[in-house]
Image (cartoon, rainbow, N blue to C red):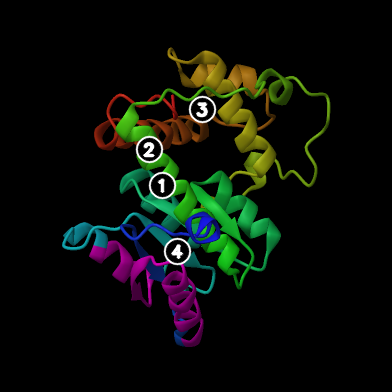
């Protein structure tokens, strides 16, 4: 009986699977079924956005496959996370792409194909977050952001911002410096202060302002959905 309780999965969470690969979609559906998670499957990023905008179905998380071809993958992750308040699981066999997705809103970033243990992590997190919301638990982060900002280690494989394509995304190291600066300046965060703390050569004010806009959208969405919870602040 104890083992059954330990391995029990929640039954109230619903996910949206986004993959153009029918066979892989069936594999993911089987994993979610094993974890007693309900789901709906769509074949493109555009269809996923349309489904979420209609608000006919309520989804607690979205699983994005890196084979999606109709939408810019990272922009899709950002839109799902920051504009629609969805928790995103990103699947890819490319470690660099998974890391980039993490920096731009993906809460989970699993190797493709995922294992049942990976899907279990999604359900465990959602259960934990539900408990936080219900009990208004205040969560404190222990990470020392000064260590990221003022480290002497050079950025590896870093492309100067003036040489980056217009639609490119930030390198992982730069994004971590941005987050660290925002945490140190909060609650009075402004682009100039963030740029000064980040101290990244070639970084333009518009780059920081765009990232701050996404950050504020995320906070506004969280405040609307989970009032009183301070985890993301």
Magenta-highlighted residues: 23-51
C-alpha separation, residue under disc 3 versus residue under disc 4: 33 Å
In the picture shown, does residue 206 fall above or below 101?
above
Residue at x-position 70% and y-position 40%: 160
Taking the magenta stretch, the answer to whether it contains residue 37 is: yes
Residue at x-position 18% and y-position 58%: 55
In the picture shown, does residue 61 fall above or below 185?
below
C-alpha separation, residue under disc 4 versus residue under disc 2: 22 Å
C-alpha separation, residue under disc 2 versus residue under disc 1: 6 Å
Packing grade of label 2 (10 A; few <14, some 14-19, many >=20) is: few
C-alpha separation, residue under disc 2 versus residue under disc 3: 39 Å
- CB of mark 3 within 8 Å of CB of mark 1? no
Where residue 135 appears, as percent x and y from the top left, is: 33, 29
In the picture shown, does residue 118 fall above or below 139?
below
As helix, strand or loop, the secondary structure at mark 1 comes to helix
- CB of mark 2 within 8 Å of CB of mark 1? yes
- CB of mark 3 within 8 Å of CB of mark 4? no
User: Which residue corresponds to mark 1?
Assistant: 127
Packing grade of label 3 (10 A; few <14, some 14-19, many >=20) is: few
User: Which residue corresponds to mark 4?
Assistant: 63
Quarter of the figure with the C terminus: top left
C-alpha separation, residue under disc 3 versus residue under disc 1: 39 Å
Where residue 104 appears, as percent x and y from the top left, is: 52, 46
User: Which residue corresponds to mark 3?
Assistant: 205
Residue at x-position 60% and y-position 25%: 180
Closest to the camera, between mark 2 and mark 3, is 2
User: Which residue corresponds to mark 2?
Assistant: 131
């Amino acid at each position: 009986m104890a083992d059954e309780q330990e391995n029990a999965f929640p039954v109230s969470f619903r996910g949206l699977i986004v993959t153009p690969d029918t066979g892989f979609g069936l594999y993911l559906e089987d994993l979610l079924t094993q974890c007693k998670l309900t789901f709906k499957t769509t074949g493109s990023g555009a269809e996923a956005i349309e489904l979420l905008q209609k608000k006919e179905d309520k989804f607690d998380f979205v699983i994005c496959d890196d084979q999606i071809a109709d939408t810019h993958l990272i922009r899709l992750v950002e839109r799902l996370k920051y504009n629609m308040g969805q928790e995103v699981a990103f699947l890819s066999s490319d470690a660099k792409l998974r890391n980039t997705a993490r920096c731009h809103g993906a809460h989970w970033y699993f190797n493709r194909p995922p294992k049942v243990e990976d899907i279990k992590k999604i359900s465990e997190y959602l259960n934990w977050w539900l408990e936080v919301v219900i009990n208004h638990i205040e969560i404190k982060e222990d990470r020392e952001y000064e260590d990221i900002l003022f480290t002497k280690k050079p950025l590896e494989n870093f492309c100067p911002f003036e040489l980056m394509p217009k639609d490119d995304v930030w390198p992982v190291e730069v994004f971590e410096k941005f987050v660290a600066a925002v945490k140190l300046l909060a609650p009075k965060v402004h682009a100039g202060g963030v740029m000064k703390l980040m101290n990244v050569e070639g970084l333009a004010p518009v780059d920081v302002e765009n990232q701050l806009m996404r950050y504020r959208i995320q906070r506004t969405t969280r405040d609307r959905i989970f009032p009183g919870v301070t985890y993301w602040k």
